[in-house]
Image (tube, helix red, strand yellow):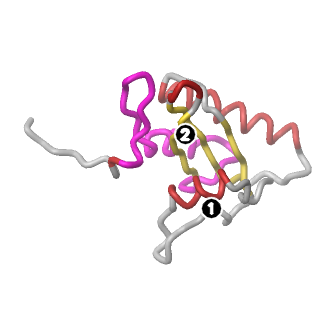
C-alpha cells in the first residue's frame, strides 16, 4: 500500500526479544481494564538482567487504596494484558492515584518524566 504510519518516538520503543514494542500499544490495551483510568497509563522500558529490556507499566486507578483485594485484581489484569501485548510479563506494575501522572502543560503524558519518578521512587502510589 506504500503508506507510512508513525507510531511514536523511536527513543520510547521497547525492544523485547529482538522485537519492537510500542508503549502506546501497551497503554491502549491496559487503558480499557476496569479500574484503570483510560488515557492515563504509561509504559516504558527498563534495562534489566544481562542488559535485556523489560517493561514497567504505571497506571492511574479509580480504585481507593483501602481495597487491597481490588487493587490486586487490577494489577493482575495489567500484568496479563501486558504479557499478551508484548510477549513478556512486566517487570513492575505500579498503580498511582488519579491525576498524578506527569503531564505537559497541554495535557500529554510524559513518559520520560514518569520513568525518572519511578527510578527515584517518587510516584504517588495508591
Of the two numbered discs 2 and 1 on the same chain, state the one appearing first in sequence.
2
* Front residue of this view, candidates 104 and 12: 12
> Which label belongs to residue 46?
2
Which residue corresponds to the image point at 54% horizontal and 32% vertical from the top-left?
54
Q: Is residue 56 left or right of residue 53?
A: right
Q: Residue furthest right?
A: 66
Q: Position of residue 33 (x, y in %)?
A: 62, 41
Disc 1: CA contacts within 10 A as few (<14), some (14-19) or many (>=20): many
Q: How many marks?
A: 2
Q: Examine the rendered structure and indicate whether residue 21 appears above or below residue 83.
A: below
**What residue is shown with label 1?**
101
Q: Quadrant of residue 74?
A: top right
Q: Quadrant of the N terminus?
A: top left
Which residue corresponds to the image point at 59% horizontal and 65% vertical from the top-left?
102
Q: Is residue 22 left or right of residue 96?
A: left
Q: Position of residue 81 (x, y in %)?
A: 58, 30
- Disc 2 is placed on an element classified as strand
Disc 2: CA contacts within 10 A as few (<14), some (14-19) or many (>=20): some
Q: Position of residue 103 (x, y in %)?
A: 54, 68
Examine the structure image and report whether residue 39 is included in the region drawn in magenta: yes
Which residue corresponds to the image point at 77% horizontal and 54% vertical from the top-left?
125
Q: Which residues are magenta?
A: 11-40
Q: Residue furthest left?
A: 2
- Disc 1 is placed on an element classified as loop
Amino acid at each position: 500500500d506504500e503508506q507510512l504510519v508513525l507510531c511514536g518516538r523511536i527513543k520510547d520503543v521497547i525492544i523485547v526479544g529482538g522485537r519492537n514494542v510500542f508503549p502506546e500499544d501497551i497503554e491502549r490495551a491496559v487503558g480499557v481494564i476496569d479500574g484503570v483510568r483510560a488515557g492515563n497509563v504509561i509504559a516504558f522500558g527498563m534495562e534489566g538482567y544481562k542488559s535485556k529490556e523489560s517493561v514497567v507499566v504505571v497506571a492511574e486507578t479509580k480504585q481507593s487504596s483501602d481495597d487491597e483485594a481490588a487493587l490486586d485484581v487490577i494489577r493482575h489484569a495489567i500484568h496479563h494484558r501486558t504479557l499478551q501485548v508484548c510477549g513478556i510479563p512486566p517487570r513492575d506494575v505500579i498503580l498511582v492515584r488519579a491525576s498524578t501522572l506527569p503531564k505537559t502543560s497541554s495535557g500529554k503524558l510524559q513518559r520520560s518524566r514518569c520513568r525518572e519518578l519511578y527510578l527515584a521512587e517518587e510516584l504517588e502510589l495508591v
